[in-house]
Image (cartoon, rainbow, N blue to C red):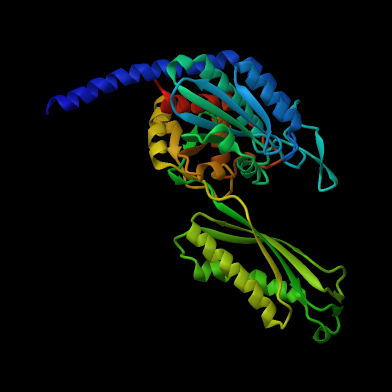
Amino acid sequence: MTLRPLAALFASMLVLPAFAQDNGAVAAKIDAMYPKLDAIYKDLHAHPELAFQEVRTAAKLAAEMRAIGFEVTEKVGKTGIVAIYKNGPGPTVLVRTEMDGLPMEEKSGFDYSSKAHAQLDGKDTMVAHSCGHDVHMAAWLATARTLVALKSQWKGTLMFIGQPAEEIVSGAKAMINDGLFTRFGKPDYAFALHSWPHAYGTIGYNSGPVSSNSDAIEITFKGRGGHGSAPDKAVDPVMIAARFVVDVQTVISREKDPKEFGVVTIGAINGGSVGNIIPDSVKVRGTIRSYTPQVREKILAGVRRTAIASAAMADAPAPDVELIPGGAAIINDEKLVARTEGVLKQAFGDDKVWRMPAMTASEDFSQFANAGIPAMFFFTGVYSPEAVAEAEKPGGKPIAFNHSPYYAPVPEPSIKTAARAMTLAVINVMAK
């Protein structure tokens, strides 16, 4: 009996040097390839493409993956790519990157800033990688190249996914509906990462919920138009919409458990043309966010009921209520998180790796994570520690968040951190 603690101690002494060797080899490989990664990153940054328009991006990633030795299938889920690398019997591990940019002008000031344009809903728009997907793609390529270079240390099958249309929360579902798992097999584990406005070299994650459920609200309130001076001769949909915007918040404050997260935000009200005409209709758009299925269903039911009641109070026709499902919450697998965080803490240090609260934004990696695959989604920092420290001071200079036109990751340490973390996470579940 007394030998067991000694055996465990001896085993841990063997593991630590082996891990240190793996960690050093991973870092060295990524350092050596960085000049090529930097060129790829800046090219991707300068040439972003919108959701389901990622033709150039997908072709570039596919060519790089073929050069590494992967078998690549293109046009999965419209513009998605699937890259497979087999290295003997063992688990299949999915590693995802997103490929799409945002319909906005970049104002980062980089000499490689995007000047790209695209068509969106028939209108011209500028396009920018203001959410860090270019960082993710560069790190994804670095991870693939490093894993192949170190294939003597692991066994199994790599399934690298280049996913379109994350920004409109549609690409993962499109790939699954196009037979991702039936054509290429269902993986045993899935990983993805996302840049965040913290110091490079840091990693954040959660065990359990990581992101929120997202549902869109589109409601058309119907009235009867008339002159603004005679509201009694009309049925005013502006008033109905206004009542709904106020009353729907009671679903959050009086129906939802106050200990549970849930948000209803109305972001757009459109109706009418001039101030003295009561319009025939008003359209209301908004978003619903939640973590759990129970809260999600309660809010959805409450929004619908409140919309119908608001119209009924004015003796107006029933509104057209569309509650459009978006991304589900990402739920990190607790066992996989526990297995991975030890490796990350050994590599980066306890003070650089920590658990964080779930974010209230949404991400369609949930389509993979909620398909019965143990999954882990984590965040890696992109700003200098000095810039982050300054931003945290009272009155300090703020740093730009994701989706800001000023979002400006520091490329080299950001990409290296992400690639190193992902490579170590994958090797950890595939080690020989």
Residue 247 in view in this figure: no
Q: Residue at x 63, y 43 (%)?
A: 177
Q: In x, y percent, where is residue 368?
A: 54, 41
Q: In x, y percent, where is residue 37?
A: 64, 20
Q: Is residue 375 above or below residue 284?
A: above
| Depth order, front residue of 90/299 | 90
On screen, residue 50 versus residue 246, left or right, reads: right
Where's the N terminus, which quadrant? top left
Q: Residue at x 72, y 26 (%)?
A: 59
Where's the C terminus, which quadrant? top left
On screen, residue 300 versus residue 241, left or right, reads: left
Q: Residue at x 77, y 32 (%)?
A: 114
How many tags in the picture? Answer: 0
| Depth order, front residue of 175/321 | 175
| Depth order, front residue of 175/289 | 175
In the displayed orientation, state which residue is furthest to the bottom. Answer: 232
In the displayed orientation, state which residue is furthest to the left. Answer: 1
Residue 14 in view in this figure: yes
| Depth order, front residue of 50/272 | 50
Q: In x, y percent, where is residue 253?
A: 52, 68
